[in-house]
Amino acid sequence: MEILYNENGQNLTVKLKGELDHHFATESRGKIDERLNSGQVKNLTFDMEKLDFIDSSAIGFIIGRYKIVKKNDGKLEIINASHKIRRILDMSGVGKIINIK
């Protein structure tokens, strides 16, 4: 799994490449949360263009970040999800609460 961060003002874009699974979710949670809890970042975008796989821990990871962003009156969105990833997100209910483009 590879992750790239791009911070621009109050916006943080996290580009994901590879597989978003339990190992990755645990490892990167702190890095993203630190930025979200700093008060400088309000909005979060997950760019899933190069993401090949997600599992249930990834869904929990996304929902957890959504709760932090919402608490800070920000927005979370998901962009560039493949049809396969989008289907998993929609089946899990993520698509009902998070904007997926």
Image (spheres, helix red, strand yellow):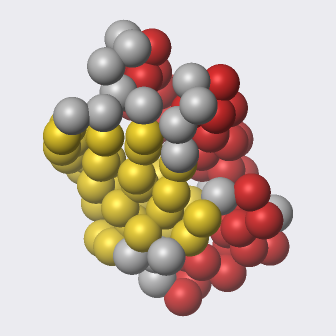
Q: Please tell me which residue is depicted at 46% across the width and 82% down the height of the picture.
A: 82
Residue 42 sits above or below residue 88 on the image: above
| Rendering quarter of residue 70 | top right
Q: Position of residue 20 (x, y in %)?
A: 47, 52
Image location (x, y in percent) of residue 42 = 42, 31
Expressed as whole percent of the image width and height from the top left, the position of residue 73 reads 59, 31
Residue at 49%, 62% in the rendered image = 78
* Foreground residue among 100 and 42: 42
Q: Using the image, determine if residue 74 lies above or below residue 82.
A: above
Question: In this orientation, does residue 43 appear?
Answer: yes
- Against 71, is 19 above or below? below
Residue placed at 71% from the left, 67% from the top? 95
Residue sitting farthest toward the bottom: 83
Taking the spot 42% from the left edge, 69% from the top edge, the residue there is 79
Judge by depth and name the residue closer to the eye, 28 or 66: 66
**Residue closest to the eye, 26 or 96:** 96
Q: Is residue 11 left or right of residue 43?
A: left
What x and y, as percent, mark residue 14?
31, 47
User: Looking at this view, is 37 or 53 the one in front?
Assistant: 37
Left or right of 52 in this view: 93 = right
Total label count? 0
Asked whether residue 68 appears in the rendered view, the answer is no
Which corner quadrant of the image does residue 48 belong to?
bottom left
